[in-house]
Amino acid sequence: MALDTNCIVRFFDIKPLLRPTHPFFKDKQGFIEDYAAYKTDPNSEHFLLYPKCRYEHRNNPHRRFRLSRSHTGRTFKKLIDLREACHLANLKFVNLDLTLAKELSEWLGQQPGGHEMAWRLFKHWLDNCLAKLMPQDSTMALWAVLHFWSTKNPLEPHFHFHICLLNYVEVLAFDDPENGQTYELGERPFPVNEDGKRTPFTKAQLAELRSGSRRIQANFAYRHRIDAPSLAQDQEADLYVAYLNFNKPDDTPRIINRLKYMTRPPIVDYARVSNKNKSYPNPTELILKYTTQMRTFGFARRLKGLIGEVDDSEICKLSPLTGKKMEYIGRLTREEALYHAQGTLGRLDFIKGKPVFGELTERELDWLKEVDYSEYPNPGWYKAHRDDPDALLAPRPPP
């Protein structure tokens, strides 16, 4: 996919997170020093630009979001290396979202050990419901993240799990008394659904997964004497299922963005919501400290033994469009990036995993100047003028 100009990656994520407007973040602002430039196509003259930032505080939302994205990159590289090392020609990524009942979320949110209780609930569902749908004597590979907050209202308890499951399982290939057991990865073919389509699970299996989750949650509520009327009703638990194909070019950015969505910390959603409401309550200590680290299950915990070490250096950064390695060009200042693109800059954002290109407006280019670290005469200048937008955009005399 050729670029028409130099594009800043995820500009719409950078702007609200680098400089959040809620009073809580007044002393937690960020700056852009310069941009790491990469080529996605050796025949293109244009680059993808990744801002390199400085922050006033460790709890700047963009800093926390950037750290979570670095873990995402390593996970995606492992999956690509696994596909190549083990010759997984038909690798697919099954996405599941499992939501706990509202009454359980509210109760768990008040408990000191509520998160670990939720993980035990999840593990019980995994072992007694999902594992039963796998081939006999096989081991699946699964990644899961617990979110305890609501996207629309991060201060509201809303416990749910984001899950990624591979369509390959580990099975015993040889059992040699002298040399021990040998395992291999085999594909778990998608079953044919009741309407004739191949899907990760049939409608009957989905119903079994949902009813199993409701049953496990109801038993948990009974043991802990939680009043949960929604679980007493004859309805299935909330479970979303979809899948993405590693062999489809259009699915590559969707896989990457799915991983990024899973691992974003709660302070990111808090910043987005509080930007629209200056009177929104300050974040809790849990929102500030919580890290959405993935937990691995099955042979996903042993990928290192299958693929070896993963090179996660800057030079091996993968394209958010194709998942292939990009060519590292170097660091560019804002002026250099503008000069190279003849005075314009573009953006590359993602909406539901789909890449969306656009050209930055004059106002957005002014904002980039406003947050350019090189524009400030000394470290204390910004703090003295942070509330004066005219000063932030005023021309600087040469040093």
Image (cartoon, rainbow, N blue to C red):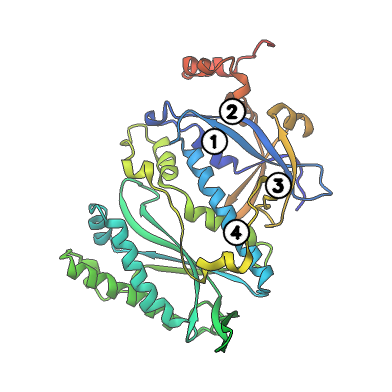
Image coords of residue 375 (percent x, y): 62, 20
Point out the frontmost of discs 1 and 3: 3
**Rendered position, 158 above or below 66:** below
* Tag 4 and tag 3, C-beta contact below 8 Å: no
For label 3, the residue is 315
- Single out the residue that lies furthest toward the right: 43
> Which of the 4 image quarters holds residue 131?
bottom left
Q: Within 10 Å of the Cα at label 2, are there few (<14), some (14-19), or many (20+) other Cα atoms?
A: some
Residue 247 can be seen, yes or no: no
Which residue corresponds to the image point at 68% horizontal and 74% vertical from the top-left? 87
| Distance CA(mark 1)–CA(mark 2) | 8 Å
Image coords of residue 397 (percent x, y): 67, 10
Is label 3 in a helix, a strand or a loop?
A: helix
* Tag 1 and tag 3, C-beta contact below 8 Å: no
Q: Within 10 Å of the Cα at label 4, are there few (<14), some (14-19), or many (20+) other Cα atoms?
A: some
Residue 367, disc: 2
For label 1, the residue is 15
| Distance CA(mark 4)–CA(mark 1) | 25 Å
Which residue corresponds to the image point at 24% horizontal and 52% vertical from the top-left? 112
What's under tag 4, amino acid-wise? Phe
* Tag 1 and tag 2, C-beta contact below 8 Å: yes
120 on left or right of 93: left
What's under tag 2, amino acid-wise? Trp
| Distance CA(mark 2)–CA(mark 4) | 32 Å
